[in-house]
Image (cartoon, helix red, strand yellow):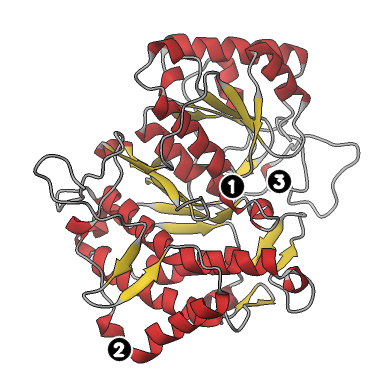
């Protein structure tokens, strides 16, 4: 219910409906066959013209205070773009749930011939969810609006881009009982795009580059830790600065959680689980795997615990949730979460998250420049065949960032831009919330990082 004389708000994570027909429900699906049957009914019994969405004024965002203020026609073009992206993520959630169930509940069909996942050349995980979600965003949501460029993590060849077989993804076949859900989701997202990505925002959108990580945290997604994965969508201006973004966790329980923001429009929105008691201490968020000696030293210097979590987008959301929960408590200023990384992630991991952090008063900066106490230095988010942030003799060549077929042994630092992948983040990162984004807070972090680096320099690998 609303407050005072306000009308009751609609929880957009419950359902999306036309006038009489429920199109999709984000309630977790335990019966995949039932989901497929429902999808078939949607697309076979009703003409496409029936599928429609409530006007934007009926959509509600969870604001910074936890309430749900309605969007209106005065919303800026970036907010509308974030809104439409969130709606698309909602529509894809039942499909993602079904693929996740297939991975976890039917391990016999997960790999091998006819499987739904594989390991890529750089030893990273890939599932049919990665390829399908990226296609739905690029070919169904953003296809009819002119953007400067779109960069996705999953690089399909030109032939696959021009002639899409929606049931074949990077040599993997989508199971037959999930195929109808792919069809109905695609139809719904195409309708969403027609309704909300309007041409009067063309001047703004034509300058934007979109960076997409369809399933950030694929390894967690494919190993039963789906609540740690996220869809990351970032929008950068013509200078390559992240200006708007969405990070959406489709498998959060009891319902999806998300953050969205565009600082230049004063737009910052979130939907987290019911507020829990915030942590009484700060923490350093890290990968589920091993960490570098530098991060070990930093944890000791900061005297904070390490919290293991998968996915860069998920860690940014954890950081923001803690930051928001302690925002009005000055005594908790140094109890925020930090995400500091000296090992490689990529532009699609950080573009959307960077924009969201800034919208809520935080920041995401290059670790190398933060150490030098120079002017704030950000990664460049533009489509390019070479790495626009490359600095010779800084980062070590690894299977994740190298263009070389054979890595040198022992490990060597990259000397030429041709040796590294175009979208690898080679300078590390420092991410923090509003509570640290002050002169005092930055000095506290920089002093700790410098002391740790004096003992164990950042790996940058």
Residue 416 in percent (x, y) is at 71, 40
Q: Nearer the viewer, mark 1 or mark 3?
A: 1
Relative to residue 257, is residue 203 drawn left or right?
A: left
Say which residue appears at 51% left-offset and 69% top-offset: 95
Residue 47: numbered disc = 2
**N-term mark: 2 or 1:** 2
Q: Are marks 2 and 1 in contact (CB under 8 Å)?
A: no
Q: Furthest residue to the right?
A: 409
Residue tagged 3: 401
Q: Earlier in the sequence, mark 1 or mark 3?
A: 1
Q: Is residue 247 above or below residue 198?
A: above
Q: Is residue 336 left or right of residue 171?
A: left
Task: Indicate the position of residue 363 as horizontal and vertical percent values.
Answer: 45, 28
> Image quarter for residue 111?
bottom right
Q: Secondary structure at mark 2?
A: loop
Measured Cα–Cα span from mark 2 to mark 1: 37 Å
Q: Which residue is mark 1?
A: 228
Between 126 and 156, the one lying in front of the other is 126
- The answer to whether one can see residue 388 in this image is no
Residue 51 position (above or below residue 207)? below
Please name the residue shown 14% across and 48% down the image. 74
- Residue 328, compared with residue 253, is above or below; it is above
């Amino acid at each position: 219910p609303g407050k005072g004389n306000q009308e009751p708000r609609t929880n957009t994570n419950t359902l999306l409906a036309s006038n009489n027909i429920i199109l999709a429900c984000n309630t977790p699906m335990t019966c995949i066959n039932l989901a497929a049957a429902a999808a078939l009914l949607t697309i076979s019994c009703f003409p496409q013209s029936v599928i429609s969405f409530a006007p934007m004024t009926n959509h509600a965002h969870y604001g910074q205070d936890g309430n749900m203020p309605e969007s209106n026609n005065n919303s800026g073009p970036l907010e509308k773009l974030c809104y439409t992206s969130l709606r698309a993520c909602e529509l894809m959630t039942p499909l993602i749930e079904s693929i996740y169930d297939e991975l976890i509940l039917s391990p016999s069909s997960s790999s091998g011939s006819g499987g739904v996942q594989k390991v890529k050349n750089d030893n990273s995980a890939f599932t049919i969810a990665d390829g399908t979600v990226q296609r739905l965003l690029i070919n169904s949501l953003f296809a009819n609006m002119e953007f400067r460029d779109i960069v996705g993590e999953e690089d399909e060849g030109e032939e696959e881009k021009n002639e899409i077989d929606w049931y074949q993804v990077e040599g993997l076949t989508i199971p037959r009982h999930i195929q109808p859900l792919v069809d109905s989701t695609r139809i719904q997202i195409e309708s969403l795009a027609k309704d909300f990505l309007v041409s009067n925002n063309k001047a703004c959108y034509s300058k934007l580059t979109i960076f997409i990580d369809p399933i950030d945290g694929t390894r967690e997604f494919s190993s039963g830790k789906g609540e740690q994965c996220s869809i990351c969508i970032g929008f950068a201006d013509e200078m390559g600065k992240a200006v708007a973004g969405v990070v959406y966790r489709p498998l959060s329980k009891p319902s999806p959680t998300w953050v969205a923001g565009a600082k230049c429009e004063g737009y910052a929105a979130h939907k987290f689980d019911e507020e829990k008691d915030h942590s009484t201490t700060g923490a350093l968020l890290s990968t589920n795997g091993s960490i570098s000696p530098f991060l070990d030293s930093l944890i000791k210097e900061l005297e904070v615990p390490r919290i293991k979590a998968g996915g860069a987008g998920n860690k940014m959301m954890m950081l923001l949730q803690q930051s928001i929960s302690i925002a009005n408590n000055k005594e908790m200023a140094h109890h925020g979460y930090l995400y500091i990384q000296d090992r490689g992630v990529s532009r699609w991991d950080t573009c959307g998250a960077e924009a969201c952090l800034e919208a809520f008063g935080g920041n995401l900066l290059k670790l190398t420049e933060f150490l030098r106490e120079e002017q704030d230095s950000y990664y460049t988010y533009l489509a390019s065949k070479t790495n626009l942030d490359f600095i010779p003799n800084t980062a070590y060549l690894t299977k994740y960032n190298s263009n070389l077929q054979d890595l040198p042994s022992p490990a060597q630092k990259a000397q030429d831009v041709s040796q590294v992948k175009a979208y690898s983040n080679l300078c590390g990162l420092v991410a923090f919330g509003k509570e640290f984004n002050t002169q005092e807070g930055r000095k506290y972090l920089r002093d700790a990082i410098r002391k740790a680096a004096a003992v164990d320099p950042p790996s940058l690998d």
